[in-house]
Amino acid sequence: MIEKLHDFPMSHEDLQKIYSEDPCGLIHLILKLDIFLNKNGDEDLLLRKINFLTYELKSFCNGLHEQDKIIILNEYFFGANNFYSLAESSCLSEDLSLNQLFTSKKGNCLLLAIVYQYFANQIDLAIYAIGLQPIHIMKWYSNKKCFYIDLNRQGKIFKHDEILKIINCYNKGQDSFDALNNEQLFNTYLDELISALERNGSHEQLLTCLSLALFINENDLKALKNRGLLYYKNGYYNEALMDLKKYFSFTDFACTPQEIKTVYQKLIEIKKTEELITPISEHLH
């Protein structure tokens, strides 16, 4: 049975970081979540490390044009600091840890994209991750044009025909090449982390992340269903029933997978049994 962790301490200020366009806010929020989940890092120490790298990169780019800044950024990020992306989307939750990334210099391509975007924005380069999965392509707005950057090839800029080939071969619409805002990027990160924790069987951390997803969007049906099933598997029947009852208020019972219907019906029976069994002490009053 899992021990229910305290919910992640998500403040109103943290929530605003998701909806703002400030890249610093997004990095700080992911760092705060990482430290809370893994209990193995020093938040202030890592923040100082990030701030130092930012200061150093800015000093190299002072007074340069954008075309020179992108060269310096790639040399600094991939060369001097040796960050690199795991080419395939990693199944391990550790590869989505910001603390782990700054220690080992390797990580899930999504996390690398978030950090690369942060450093780019710090030197006034309008570079943002796009929605094409797995996330590893960045969109750079420069001089009323846009270019695409491949993090799996150390920041190489795609040729026009290469982008057309991706669109044609993978049958992806133009929407997949739109830049993601902070809210979309954080929700993608959280979804990826939840999937990794489900595969790894890390129930305590998974519960925290599912609860965070529901704090951000209380009607997230996937998170409601998954948290309800997780509560059930670990013996928290009242909490499981509350989640699944809300889930079914938005979902057609007949169209739901049999596993979820079976669990829900068992929870209702458990609840009825509990209500029938009245302690003797209550009859004496």
Image (spheres, rainbow, N blue to C red):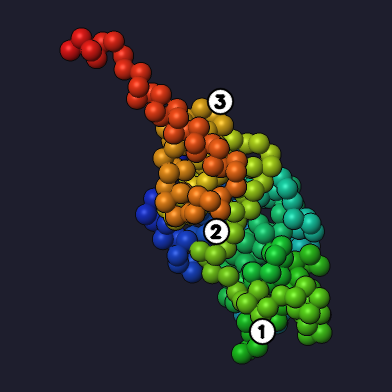
**Would you call the spot at circle 3 few (<14 residues within 10 Å), some (14-19), or many (20 or more)?**
few
Q: Give me the residue at 49% from left, 36% from top.
A: 265
Mark 2 vs mark 3, foreground winner is: 3
Q: Which residue is mark 3?
A: 1
Give the distance between the C-alpha atoms of the residues marked 2 and 3, in whole angstroms.
28 Å
Residue 127, visible in the rendered structure: no
Q: Give me the residue at 41% from left, 24% from top.
A: 273
Q: Give me the residue at 64% from left, 71% from top.
A: 130
Task: Using the image, determine if residue 110 lies above or below residue 233.
Answer: below
Q: Which residue is mark 2?
A: 187
**Which quadrant of the figure has residue 179?**
bottom right
Which label sits on residue 235? none
Image x and y of residue 11, in percent: 39, 50
Q: Secondary structure at mark 1?
A: strand
Task: Using the image, determine if residue 63 lies above or below residue 15.
Answer: below
**Would you call the spot at circle 2 few (<14 residues within 10 Å), some (14-19), or many (20 or more)?**
some
Q: Along the line of sight, which residue is nearer the eye, 88 or 120? A: 88
Q: Which residue is mark 1?
A: 146
Q: Secondary structure at mark 3?
A: loop
Image x and y of residue 69, in percent: 68, 76
The kind of residue tagged 3 is Met
